[in-house]
Amino acid sequence: MQNPSEVSWQFIKEACYRMKNVQSTVTLSNGEQMPWLGLGVFKMSDGQEVINCVETAIQNGYRSIDTASLYDNEEGVGQAIKSSAVPREQLYITTKIWNSDQGYESTLKAFDRSMNKLGLDYLDLYLIHWPVKGKYKETWKALEKLHRDGRVRSIGVSNFQIHHLQDLLEDAEIKPVVNQVELHPLLSQVELREYCKSEGIQIEAWSPLAQGQLLDNEVLKAIGAKYGKSTAQVIIRWDLQNEIVTIPKSAKEHRIIDNANVFDFELTSEEMEQINELNQNKRIGPDPDNFDF
């Protein structure tokens, strides 16, 4: 009989086999396909910067683009999608409802604004950006309506902790298929990942590179040197082998390309454990239980 660690590593190996390139997908609990790797556009200015970045990503094989109403660049993302030679149905577009727009009717109105800016007929994934106390359950009801009406193929949440998810699931008619959270080797979120896996909720990492704070880490640099890879590529590979959807952000063309060049090597179980041990439960962004936006 195999011990649990051997079984776990075999499962990871099988998952890696299914991840062949930047267009490889995971099947969500509702049967929809979501790319494992995408481009995040947080802090990219609307207009030419975000247009250029999204166009570059799509031209280099990316099919998943993640934006939000807060980012104020949905219009630029939409322009890049429209100018792309890749058919809309081959792209996976995510946006999010901001805190001040939460509530049932206000969410429906905010969704319409986002869709007008994006210039899309339907959305692949719509997320509640933060768990605003007293509002996220009504917001979720609006997302369920949008899903039932066929305007959104998948609905999910962002920055939800276990207790938020448990509370939401008490009344939800449709279970979230994705929980997008801050996740990187300094904040590995193991307990949350295990809970989401048990509930069939796919974990997605924002700020997977810890906003650059890990790029000079000696452990990651040593692992990268072995494979001729950067620390960023090692972290992204760690995400993928942990079956975490990841959306690294970069406004530089060579980094957008490099971030997708992670399918030609595989970290060993020992290297994965070395990276796991970097965890400090350290957040770069706000704590979902203690924020005031």
Image (spheres, helix red, strand yellow):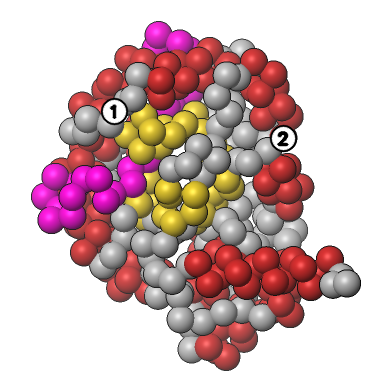
Query: Is residue 235 in sight in this rendering?
Result: no
Q: Which residue is mark 1?
A: 114
Side of 146 relative to 82 (left or right): right
Q: Earlier in the sequence, mark 1 or mark 2?
A: 1
Residue type at mark 2: give it: Ile
Asked if labels 2 and 1 touch by Cβ distance under 8 angstroms, the answer is no
Left-right relation of 1 to 141: right
In the current view of this chain or complex, which residue is farthest to the front?
Answer: 1
Where is residue 174 drawn, in percent x and y?
55, 24
Question: Could you tell me which secondary element the residue under label 1 belongs to?
Answer: helix
Looking at the image, residue 281 sits to the left or right of residue 285; the answer is right
Query: Callout 1: few (<14), some (14-19), or many (20+) C-alpha neighbours within 10 Å?
Result: many
Question: What residue is shown at x 68% (from left), y 56% (from top)?
Answer: 188
The kind of residue tagged 1 is: Ser
Give coordinates of residue 233: x percent, y percent. Answer: 49, 73
Could you say which disc has been placed on residue 162 in the image? 2
Residue 270 is a magenta residue: no
- Residue range of the region highlighted in magenta in the rendering: 81-106
Instruction: Name the image quarter holding residue 154.
Output: top left
